[in-house]
Image (tube, rainbow, N blue to C red):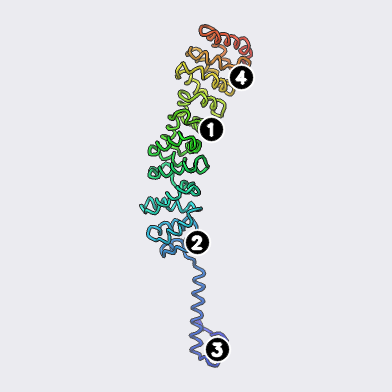
Amino acid sequence: MHVVVPPLWVRYHPRVTRARALLFTLVLIGTVSAAISTGCHAPTVQEAEQKGDVAFLDEASSGDAVAALGRLADTNPAARAALAKRAESDMNVYLAAWAATLRGAPWGAEMLRQGLADPARAGLAASALPRRDIRVAPFVTDLEQSMVRLSSSLQGAVIAAVLSSIGPSAHAAVERRLVDPHTRGAMCQGLSSPDASGDAKSTLLAVPSEARDNASCVSTVTALAKTDEVVLGWLATAAEPGLLSVAAKGDLPCPRLTTVWQRALAERPKETYGALAVPLSFALKRCAHELDPALSALLFQAPAARACIVQAIDPIGAETTELKETCKTLPLATRGGDNRTRERAQDTIENACKNVRQ
């Protein structure tokens, strides 16, 4: 058994009885114990949420704390006010707002729309929205209007990435942003996102060529052609010659570039071949070795393509030394056809093909 000893000044004060001294000491010990207990146990986020402690959660500032504020905000105006104060710089607020939207709490959608409507925080609000989620469809109009306000800024590209990921529900909005020269660049940057939907990418290929007249659009198409068979096929059979030139001079792997030209010179209308000679010449500068067997076969199988191939080969170009198979079938281009093609083919045979590596 512990004996409580009162402080010295209590024990020896002339007017303090022994009983009063003991009572004073017990009160003092209880007060100190309570203070120690309180100081050693800070409430958790869960406990604060259960108690509705908005101030504690607001000060905590962590993602979990803001999420808890969001749940309280469904019924607690003070929690909504705390979130509104943080909305200018804390993406966790918009993550909480999206969670509220999924719960059907009206404040969530309202806060997301307010964020998207404010150019200073539209990027934050958009970044909180999930990609490839049809539940984002109700925000298509808000996202599109936000893009218009932000034009070609970096935030515009962030918003475009969300818009391009939604799918058919956003088809018309994606098309409008591509047609509009002010938002075209941002929209094409958004389409380069790995989350872009097939519908959005198809829209990029389907719009008129002038709606792709932007460096970001050209870059996106050529990047997609590296891995996407549909885009590669479109590049071969329907893309404007300027895009073929960019792909030829860029970093599209030579085997895929070869596939492009195999299909282009076999499937495109013959009247378009005249515009393909320059892009093909660029391709030969970089990928002559890989293109050689394909061009040799085309000279034999596709007589209509002979003029284009002959015009694309530089009779004095160093790359011609890689055209071993093509030089074997090039004499076919000296028979028939127009005089210009026959003469250039003969010139190539006499000056370039003799230097072909064996």
Mark 1–mark 3 Cα distance, whole angstroms, equals 90 Å
The numbered mark, 1 or 4, whose residue comes first in the sequence reads 1
Kindly identify which residue carries mark 1: 215
Q: Is residue 147 above or below residue 281?
A: below
What mark, if any, has residue 293 been given in the picture? none
In the rendered image, residue 68, in percent from the top left (x then y), is placed at 43, 58
Instruction: Evaluate if marks 2 and 4 touch, with contact meaning CB atoms under 8 Å apart.
Output: no
The numbered mark, 2 or 4, whose residue comes first in the sequence reads 2
Mark 1–mark 2 Cα distance, whole angstroms, equals 46 Å
Task: Tell me the amino acid under the disc marked 1.
Answer: Ala
Task: Tell me the amino acid under the disc marked 2.
Answer: Glu
Mark 2–mark 4 Cα distance, whole angstroms, equals 68 Å
Kindly identify which residue carries mark 3: 11
Quadrant hosting residue 6: bottom right
The numbered mark, 3 or 4, whose residue comes first in the sequence reads 3
Name the front one of labels 1 and 2. 1
Judging depth in this view, the residue of 319 and 245 nearest the camera is 245
What mark, if any, has residue 319 been given in the picture? 4
